[in-house]
Image: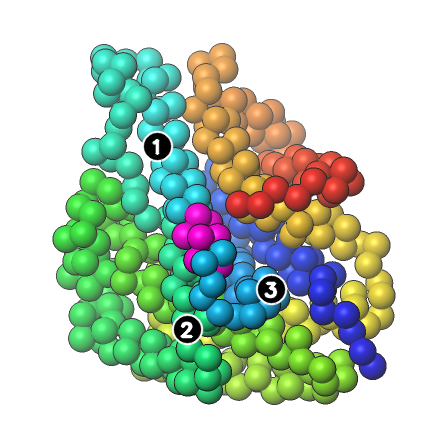
Amino acid sequence: MKMKTERLMSLDVLRGITVAGMILVNNPGDWGYIYAPLKHAEWNGLTPTDLVFPFFMFVMGVSMSFSLRKFDYRPTRDFLVKLVRRTAVLFLLGVALSWVSLVLSRWLSPDSTMSWSQILFPFEQVRVWGVLQRLALSYFFASLLVVTVRNRRILGYIVVGILLVYGFILTLGHGFELSTANVIAVVDRAVVGENHMYLEWLPDGGRISFDPEGLVSTLPGIAHVLIGFFCGRLLMSSKPLNDKMVHLAVVCAVLLIVGFLLGYGWPVNKKVWSPSYVLVTCGFAMLTLIVLIWVLDMRNRRRWAYPFRAFGCNPLFIYVFASFLAIVLETIPCGGLSVKEQLYGWIAGWAVVPQLASLIYALVYVAFNGLLACVLLQKKIFIKV
C-alpha cells in the first residue's frame, strides 16, 4: 500500500493537537484551580501536560525532513538565508512577547509612577529564553547538522552523543536539583543574568531564578528535533506503508523502553529536558503519529480532525496570536478587574467546581483561537513564521 508523503494529514493533525494542547495548558481560568493532568510535574515525573511542547519539537523535526528536501539537504545559499531569517524571527517573537507583557503591565498599573521610557523599554527585565526561543535554536542547529553531516549513521551517533554528554553534564553539575547550584541556572545567570530568567516555583512556595527553557537545556532539544527528522525520513522512504508502520512501531517501542530504563539514573524531567525525557516523549509522539496515520491516512476517517488540521496548518501564527491575546486579556482593566478575570468570574458563577470553571475557560479560549484557525484554513491562508 502506497501513501503520498507530500502533505500528510496525520502530520498536520498531530501538529494541530499539540498547538491546541499548548494553548489549553497555558490558559486556565485560575492557576490555583487546575485538574492534575493539566499541570506540569513539579520536578521529576511526567504528566500529559509535559508532552505537548516536546510533541511540537518532534513534529518540527518530521516536517524538516520534508521541507529540506527541496534544498537536497545541502547548505545552499537560499537554505542558509531562510534558516537564519526564520531563526531570528522566531527568537525575536519570543522576546517580544515578554516585552509586550512587561510594557502592558507597567502602563496599566494603577500605581505606576514610571516615565514613558521606563514603560516602553523594560529591557532590564525582559526574559531572554522561552518556548519560541527554544524552537528557534533547536531548529537552527538541527538543520545545520542535517545539511552538513551527509552520513545519516554518523548523524544518529551525534544524537546519541548529545544525549550522553548532556546527561553527564547534568550529573556533574547538580542538574537534577531544583536549586541555584543547578548547572542550567548557573550558566543562565552568567550569560543573561537573573533579571532575564524565569522564576521557578519551589515546593515550599518560594521562587528561584531557574529557566526551564535555558541555554544549556536547549542542547537536548537539538537531539529531539533530529529524532523527529529521522522519523520523517522513514515516512519518506519508498517502502510500503505497512512496512513503514512496523518500523515506526519498533522504533517507538525502543525509545519508550530505553527512555524509561534510563530514567532510573537520569530521571524523566521536563524542566531540565533530561535525556530520558527526550526519548520517552519522542516515543509517545511517534506512537500518537502511528495511530493518526492509521486513522486518517489509512482508514480515511478525517471529518473529526478538521479543527486540529486547522491549528496544524498555521501552528506558530496561532500560538503567537493566542499568547499575545492572553497577555492583553490578563492586563487590560475592566471594572476594577482584568478582562480575563471578568470572563472567568462569569463562568465561575455558574460552574460549581472551581477546577471545572478553570477548564471551561481554557476550552473556550482554545475554541476561540480554533475559530480563527478554521477561517484561515477555509480561506487557504497559510502564514509562515
* Nearer-the-camera pick, 330 or 349: 330
- Using a 10 Å C-alpha cutoff, classify the residue at mark 2 as few (fewer than 14 neighbours), some (14 to 19) or many (20 or more): few
Can residue 133 be found in the magenta stretch? no
**Coloring basis for residues:** rainbow
Residue 159, quarter of picture: bottom left
Examine the rendered structure and indicate whether residue 143 appears above or below residue 115: below
Q: Residue at x 18, y 75 (%)?
A: 172
Residue 373 visible at all: yes
* Nearer-the-camera pick, 368 or 360: 368
Pair 3/1: label in front: 3
* First of labels 3, 1 by sequence position: 3
Q: Are marks 2 and 3 in contact (CB under 8 Å)?
A: no
- Using a 10 Å C-alpha cutoff, classify the residue at mark 3 as few (fewer than 14 neighbours), some (14 to 19) or many (20 or more): few
**Amino acid tagged 2:** Thr
Residue receiving disc 2: 148
The percent coordinates of residue 52 (x first, y second) are 53, 58
Q: What element carries label 2?
A: helix
Examine the rendered structure and indicate whether residue 179 appears above or below residue 193: below
Q: Do the residues labelled 3 and 1 touch (CB within 8 Å)?
A: no
* First of labels 2, 1 by sequence position: 1
Q: What element carries label 3?
A: helix
Res 357 label = none
Q: Residue at x 41, y 73 (%)?
A: 148
Alpha-carbon span between mark 2 and mark 3: 15 Å
